[in-house]
Image (cartoon, helix red, strand yellow):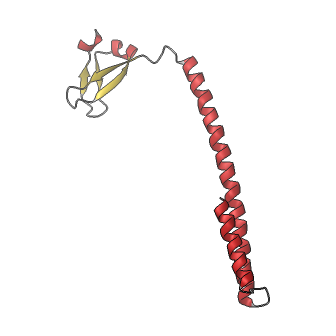
Amino acid sequence: MEHLYEKVAYLKGLADGLDINNESKEGKILMQIIETLEDFTDAIVELDENQLDLADYVETIDEDLEDVEDELFEDELDYVEVECPTCKEIICVDDELLYDNEEIHCPECNEEVPVEEDKE
């Protein structure tokens, strides 16, 4: 973000070099524009710093949540991959659901997928 400060400083230097001041109407407008650009630069730098802090915070929360999920669902995420005979889509089916039902529906083509052979 330093480049933004450099650009605003450059514009200030140009205005000083051209002897632009607040005495003329045009000078007043140009000086106000430069001051406004400086305010925008400050706001953008502050937003960027806040966004970086927020990204770090979210990453920390994500890592903590992953630890909690690992503890809670340690043995509960068993699944079996079954291939749909119609569209050849690989379907991941919860192990318990697989043994409770004779057939499941393919989410891709909505055809029933027999899983009797895959239970072994």
Residue 87 location (% of width, % of height): 22, 32
Q: Nearer the viewer, residue 48 or 97?
A: 48
Q: Nearer the viewer, residue 78 or 29?
A: 29
| Residue 116 visible in the snapshot | no
Q: Residue furthest top?
A: 120
Give the residue displayed 55% in from the left and 20% down from the top: 70
Q: Residue furthest bottom?
A: 24
On screen, residue 79 versus residue 89, left or right, reads right
Q: Residue furthest left?
A: 86
Quarter residue 28 falls in: bottom right
Q: Nearer the viewer, residue 2 or 109?
A: 2
| Residue 111 visible in the snapshot | yes
**Image vertical order of residue 77 relative to residue 15, above or below:** above
On screen, residue 41 versus residue 112, left or right, reads right
Quarter of the N terminus within the rendering: bottom right
**Image vertical order of residue 64 relative to residue 41, above or below:** above
On screen, residue 24 versus residue 56, left or right, reads right
Give the residue displayed 60% in from the left and 22% down from the top: 68
Quarter residue 78 falls in: top left
Quarter residue 91 falls in: top left
Quarter of the C terminus within the rendering: top left
**Image vertical order of residue 104 relative to residue 26, above or below:** above
